[in-house]
Amino acid sequence: MPTNFTAEPVRVRVPATSANLGPGFDALGLALGLYDDVAAEVASGGVRVTVTGQGAGELPDDDRHLVVRAMRAAFDVLGAHPAGLSVECVNRIPQARGLGSSSAAIVAGVLLARALVVDGEHRLDDAGALRLAAEIEGHPDNVAPCLLGGFTVAWSEPGGARAVSLPVAAAVRPTVFVPAERGLTATARAALPATVPHGDAALTAGRAALLVHALTTDPTLLLPATVDRLHQDYRAAGMPGTSALVSALRAADVAAVVSGAGPTVLALSQPPAGFPVGTDWEIWQLPIDVSGARVARGRLGHAERDPVAAGRKS
């Protein structure tokens, strides 16, 4: 079947995400109101990528860019092979901080490719887009909230990744503490042992189940619900500042966890006024994104090209 591409550009807005949320290792995720805007159109040849904001001057401007790599993977599934691509990225999600910048790029690429193909949604439905994004990322806990919005529970089956999105209680108001230093998911995963004690696994499973209830129904239980023994302690030596801040916040009865693979810290309950954080952290109060990735037609507008995260509180 011949492939027809849309003549007009397409654009997508993708939210930041925080994964794991303590005990929900590789399973739980939360979409946050901090966004990358990405636009793409089919070109007569070659690949050109422009980046504004986070990662500008660092990220590749050709086929190596993760958005383009995800687009190529989606085009393969769609059986489509455009002659060239022009991609514009306005990034507000910090790179390599544990806020889902790579998942945002992957989700953006998959959805842009699908939207550029005239019958793309028939060839690759939403469930297929999730499976493909998770396959590219290697795990579904960040791509799921990026795609679906809200609080997500994701899992993998022989046929690929699946996920559900659940509403979050109104009293949950996330705060992220973002350091200047960066972290790599591969490095954080390398610190994890091949096995953990059965008691630790059982405790963490119970807290993950409780966390679903706490986030959706009773936020007063967030502190005990975010206890984890699967990954955070093993990663602490590689992120001493992150570990110290999590411990200090939890000692002040704040439900704090490592965001994703770190080094950002996520607080699911509000820190007390005047809590001593120090100057090494940017503090952002972010709403929960309930819509997930949103696709539209046309190029990025003036507001979408603004690399500053509007409404972010420090």
Image: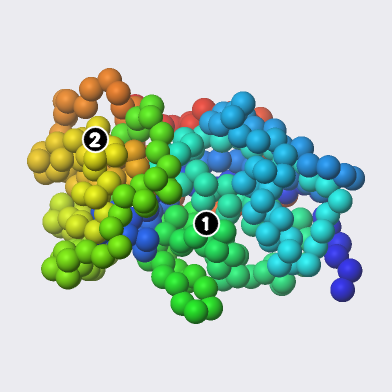
- Image: 128 above or below 187: below
Q: Secondary structure at mark 2?
A: helix
The residue tagged 1 is 137
Q: Secondary structure at mark 1?
A: helix
Point out residue 171 in the picture as x, y percentages from the top left corner: 25, 50
Q: Earlier in the sequence, mark 1 or mark 2?
A: 1
- Image: 307 above or below 1: above
The residue tagged 2 is 240
Taking 260 as reference, is 106 left or right? right
- Name the quadrant of the N terminus: bottom right
Which residue is depicted at the point 52% across and 56% down? 137
Taking 276 as reference, is 88 left or right? right
Taking 156 as reference, is 168 left or right? left
Q: Label 2 is placed on what type of residue?
A: Pro
Which residue is depicted at the point 45% across and 72% down? 156
Count the labels in the image.
Answer: 2
Residue 115 appears in view: no
